[in-house]
Image (cartoon, rainbow, N blue to C red):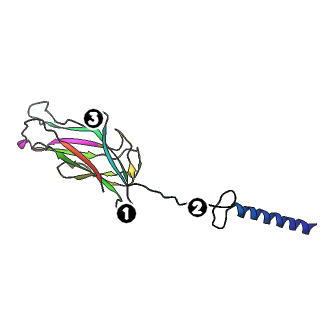
Amino acid sequence: MTKLLKILTYLVVLFLCTIEAHAQGNSNGNVNGNGNGYAFGLGVNIPQISIIALRSNSSTSISLGLDGPAEAGLGATNTKDSSIWVNYTFVKGKNTRPKAKVYAKISSGSVPSGMTLNVEAKSPTSHGKGNKGTSTGEITLTSTDQAIIENIKSANTGKGANKGHNLVYDLDLSSYNIVNYTAPVVLTITYTIAE
């Protein structure tokens, strides 16, 4: 009786092993309900992306000037604006685009003599995902591209004002002796995201 029980146990175990092997598929390792299988290739394509935008709660056009002194003998004071935000999306390429920078320049118009226009990108907010860039600190805007944010890896900042990097503009009266105000000046500041 004991031998018969052992034989039946071996047969049940063998039967279960056969069912398990059959359920795992044919000799190619492919599976469907009948033990016959099909294989297919799945391609994954991730595009390289570089998009940048400026956002504000009101307008991305701002007005800067100097605040006059409260009393005779005092100097005019600088004015600042921090109403504009930089939003971007960047997906790096395999080898050719490991990271990006945001560049800024004056693309039309010129700052009046005796004055400088400075801008600084603050640290990114917590919105968005990925490895957002870091500020290069305050720069004085010229007609040449200068990096204002660097080390952007695959990331997005979120869309809208109060997301991304806050831009702080500072109009500075640097040389009283050569200031010559004639009429309001309109400048165009261009931001670019590039490797």
User: Where residue 17 sits in the image (x, y, percent)?
Assistant: 75, 64
Query: In front: mark 3 or mark 2?
Result: 2
Q: Which residue occupies 86% across, 65% down? A: 8
Q: Which residue occupies 83% across, 67% down? A: 10
Q: Which mark is residue 59?
A: 3
Alpha carbons under labels 2 and 1: distance apart = 31 Å
User: Where residue 44 sits in the image (x, y, percent)?
Assistant: 47, 57
Quarter of the view holding residue 23: bottom right
Sequence order check, earlier mark of 2 and 1: 2
- Mark 2 sits on what residue? 39
For label 3, count other residues whose C-alpha is less than 10 Å away and answer few (under 14), some (14-19) or many (20+): few
In this rendering, position of residue 186 left or right of residue 160: left
What range of the chain is rendered magenta?
A: 167-185
The quadrant of the rendering that contains the C terminus is bottom left
Helix or strand or loop: what does disc 1 sit on? loop
Count of marks placed on residues: 3
Helix or strand or loop: what does disc 2 sit on? loop
- Find out whether residue 178 is within the magenta segment: yes
Sequence order check, earlier mark of 3 and 1: 3
- Mark 1 sits on what residue? 95
User: Where residue 102 sits in the image (x, y, percent)?
Assistant: 29, 51
- Find out whether residue 56 is within the magenta segment: no
